[in-house]
Image (tube, rainbow, N blue to C red):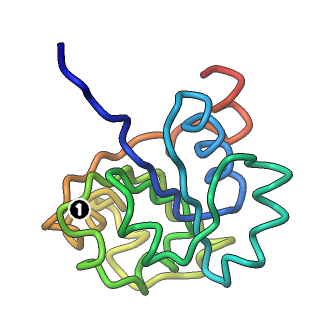
Amino acid sequence: MTNATTPTIAVLGAGHVGPAIARLALEAGHSVAIAASGNPGDLALVTELLIPGAEPLWTVDAIGKADIVVLAMPLHRFLRMDPNALSEKLVIDAMNYWPPTDGRLPPPFGDKGIGTSEVIAGRLQDATVVKTLNHVGYHELETYA
């Protein structure tokens, strides 16, 4: 009999998608940290009410303690991150390029023939990247879990 541990998950993004994914991970028995672009203290009340059991942390701290990192942030914020912070991690890419949130990003975004998946994977060459959950509406994640 093996004694497997449940992976720790960091969810980067506290908009609509991140909290839904965090709640599902908590329900599945995972330890979950959540981080946004600001001070984790500002997330404390939101976390307590909407994601009870998740730990609000600075992004670097959430990544540091995680086995799995879920990218659920606006794409333009990811592009400002140091990709080395995600080295050696299993990264779930749930992001999409959405101009109303991200603004107009320079090529290759919006160009025909290349999608965000290739750009994200290219930036995270030292991580294992899985593109998923980006095709489901945040309001459907928990409904159809």
* Label 1 SS: helix
Residue 85 horizontal side relative to residue 135, left or right: left
Q: Amino acid at mark 1?
A: Ala
Residue 2, horizontal then vertical, whole percent: 18, 20
Q: Residue at x 36, y 69 (%)?
A: 64
Q: Residue at x 59, y 76 (%)?
A: 102
Q: Quadrant of the N terminus?
A: top left
Could you say which quadrant of the image residue 61 lies in? bottom left
Residue sitting nearer the eye, 94 or 117: 94
Residue 18 horizontal side relative to residue 46, left or right: left
Residue 108, horizontal then vertical, whole percent: 32, 75
Q: Quadrant of the C terminus?
A: top right
Q: Residue at x 36, y 62 (%)?
A: 116
Callout count? 1
Residue 52, horizontal then vertical, whole percent: 75, 47
Mark 1 Cα-neighbour bin, 10 Å: few <14, some 14–19, many ≥20: some
User: Would you name the residue on which mark 1 appears?
Assistant: 121
Residue 49, horizontal then vertical, whole percent: 86, 52
Residue sitting nearer the eye, 120 or 60: 60
Spot the residue most to the top. Answer: 1
Residue sitting nearer the eye, 128 or 51: 51
Spot the residue most to the left. Answer: 126
Q: Residue at x 49, y 75 (%)?
A: 59
Could you say which quadrant of the image residue 99 lies in? bottom right
- Compared with 126, 72 (above or below) is above
